[in-house]
Amino acid sequence: MSTLLQRTLSLLLRFLLAALAAVFALSLLAAGVVVALFVVLRALLTGRRPALWETWRVVRSRQGRWRPTAAADGAAARTGVRRPAADDVTDVEARDIPRS
């Protein structure tokens, strides 16, 4: 009889933990939806894009600068922009900066 009671309690505990996990996941989802609605409504009311899109645009534009592609090299060749060669080194004269 005690094994039947232990199995029943174990099964109930598993269901309870699964229900709590589902409630937690749904609350995170609901919080995300509320935040997304707030951002969209604020953007509509102020007429400005959310900062996330501006940040993403800046990040994407900077990525292209650091990872040249074949298209970027071809565009540079068409516009006449010369890329410095690997052995093209400019020497500078070092100088001390006075403390202020």
Image (tube, rainbow, N blue to C red):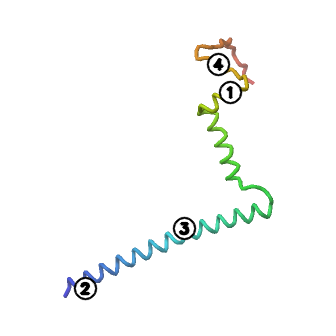
Mark 4, Cα crowd under 10 Å, few <14 / some 14-19 / many 20+, is few
Residue at 44%, 75% (x, y): give it: 20
Disc 2 target residue? 5
Q: What element carries label 3?
A: helix
| Quadrant of the drawing holding the C terminus | top right
List x then y, in percent, for residue 62: 65, 38
The answer to which image quadrant residue 99 occupies is top right
Query: Which residue type does callout 2 highlight?
Result: Leu
Badge nearest the viewer, 2 or 1: 1
Q: Name the residue under label 1.
A: 76
2 or 3: mark nearer the eye: 3
How far apart marks 2 and 4 lie (CA) works out to 79 Å
- The three-letter amino acid code for the residue at tag 4 is Pro
Three-letter amino acid code of the residue under disc 1: Ala
Gap between marks 3 and 1 measured at Cα: 47 Å
C-beta proximity under 8 Å, tags 4 and 3: no
Mark nearer the N terminus (2 vs 4): 2
Q: Name the residue under label 4.
A: 84
For badge 3, the amino acid type reads Leu
Question: Which of the two labelled residues, at mark 2 and mark 3, occupies the earlier sequence position?
Answer: 2
Q: Name the residue under label 3.
A: 28
Alpha-carbon distance for marks 4 and 1?
Answer: 12 Å
2 or 1: tag closer to the N-terminus: 2
Mark sitting earlier along the chain (4/1): 1
Nearest to the observer: residue 25 or residue 60: 60
Mark 4 vs mark 3: in front: 4
Foreground disc of the pair 3, 1: 1
The one nearer the camera, 16 or 29, is 29
Who's the residue at 68% across and 30% down the image? 75
